[in-house]
Image (cartoon, helix red, strand yellow):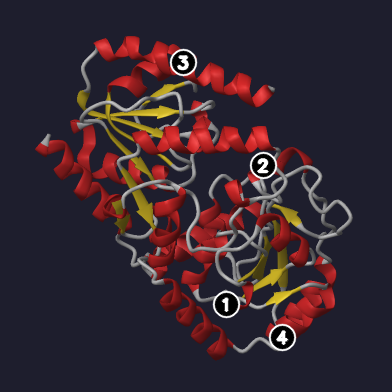
Amino acid sequence: MIWYIKLAIIYCVRIGIRVFYLFPIKKNRILFSEYEGKTYKCSPKYIFEYMYRNWGDSYEYVWCIKDKTLIPAEYSVKCVKPLSLRHLYYLATSKIMMANIGIVPIAPPRKDRIFVNTWHGGGAYKKGGLSATYYSKPHMFYFKTLRHLRAKSTTYLISSCRRFSEIFADLFIINPDRILPIGMPRNDVFFLPANEQAAVREKICRQYGIDENAMIVLYAPTYRGHEHYCQHIDWTLDADAVCTAVKKRFGKQIVFLYRCHMNVFNDRQSISHAIDASDYPNMQELLLATDLLISDYSSLIWDFSFTYRPGFLYTPDLEEYIRVTKLHTPINQWQYPYAKTIDELCFQILRYDEEAAIARIKAHHQQLGSFENGTATKTLCEFLQSQMSDK
C-alpha cells in the first residue's frame, strides 16, 4: 500500500508544481542535484566547477542539496533544500537541470527546458533496479511508473560506453539520438597530468597520515540492495591476509583503506587494521590515490580501470548475487579477476602480471566501446552552451 500512497503524493505534487509554470524559464539558470540532494561529489559537481571557472557569473547556478556546507566556500552559488518551495520554483524555471540519478519524478516536462541525466555509474556490469528479484509487485509497479515519469522529462543521457548506450536506451526509454557518447565528466580526472594526480594523492596521504611511499590498498564493496540480501554469506574482508599477499607480491609497505557504499554508511562493516575512509567526500580522488583496488560488482571498477593499476574482485556471494541482481556483462569478461574466497583472492594477488592485466583492461574497454578520453566535461558544457544560445 505504501508504494501506491507514494505515487499518489508524486502525482499531487506534479499538479501543484505547475503553479510555478506561471513564471518564465530563466535562460541562464542551471540547477544541479546529486542523489536528490544528498551529496556533492559526482559528475554534476565536476560539470558545475568547470562552468563556474570558465563561464563565471554569466550564468546563475543553483544547487539542490541538504547540507550546503558540502559545497566549497569559494563558489558563490544558491542552495535550496530538496522539495522545498524554493526547490520547486527552481525546478520549474531553470533552463538546464542535471542530476546523476534522473530527474525528480515530481517535475513534469516543460517546453524549452533541458534536463541532462549524467547517471552515476559507467560500464555495463550489474543490473539491479527493475531486473532485481527481491522487490514486491507493488514496489516494482512503483519503479516502473517512476521510470516513465522520468523518461518524459529527460532531454539527454550521458553515456560512458557503447554497451551502456545500448542497454540504457531501453532501460530509460530514451531515443538513442538523445544519448551523448562523451564519457563521464567525473572520470576526466583520470586523464589529468601526472603532477595534478600526484597532488591529489598527497592530499589523501595528509588526510589520513599515510607515508607517501606506502602502497595504498582500497577495499570498496558495492551496495547489496536489500536488507535481507545474502545474510548467510560473510563478505567481510580479511585485511591482514590481503596485506600479507600484497606485500609479498609488490614488496612495499601497505596501508589498507576501507570505504563503504553511501547507502550503508550508518551500518558499515568494521575491518581490523583498516583506515575507514567512508567519510571522505570524493570517491574519484580516493581512486586516484589508490595503488591497488579490491571491489566486487560496483561500477567504480570502470572508473578505476583508467588508472591501469592492479584491481581485483572479491565476490563470495557471486551465485546469489547473479540470481538476485543479474549482470549485463558476464563477470569473466570484466577487466579484473574475481575470487570467491580470501585464499583465491590472495592467490590472484600473488600471481598478478602487470603486462597481462593492462592488456585485459584495454581489451575490456574495447569490448564495451569506451567513450572515455578525458574531455567529457568540456564537450558537454560546450554542447549545452550552444543549446542555450540557440533557444
What residue sits 39% from the left and 56% below the top? 184
Nearer the N terminus, badge 4 or badge 1? 4
Q: Amino acid at mark 3?
A: Val
Q: Nearer the viewer, residue 295 or 136?
A: 136
Residue holding disc 3 = 13
Percent x, y of residue 368: 44, 71
Please state which of the two labelled residues, at mark 3 or mark 2, is closer to the viewer: 3
Q: Are marks 3 and 2 in contact (CB under 8 Å)?
A: no
Q: CA distance from mark 1 to mark 3?
A: 44 Å
Residue 333: which disc?
1
Q: Residues within 10 Å of mark 4 (few under 14, many from 20)?
A: some
Please state which of the two labelled residues, at mark 2 or mark 1, is closer to the viewer: 1
Q: Are marks 4 and 1 in contact (CB under 8 Å)?
A: no
Position of the N terminus by quadrant:
top right
Q: Nearer the viewer, residue 273 or 106?
A: 106
Secondary structure of the residue carrying tag 4 is helix
Q: CA distance from mark 2 to mark 1?
A: 27 Å
Secondary structure of the residue carrying tag 1 is helix
Q: Amino acid at mark 1?
A: Gln
Please state which of the two labelled residues, at mark 3 or mark 4, is closer to the viewer: 3
Q: CA distance from mark 3 to mark 2?
A: 26 Å
Residue holding disc 2 = 263
Please state which of the two labelled residues, at mark 4 or mark 2, is closer to the viewer: 2
Please state which of the two labelled residues, at mark 4 or mark 1, is closer to the viewer: 1
Nearer the N terminus, badge 3 or badge 4? 3
Looking at the image, can residue 105 be seen? Answer: yes
Residue holding disc 4 = 249
Q: Residue furthest right?
A: 232
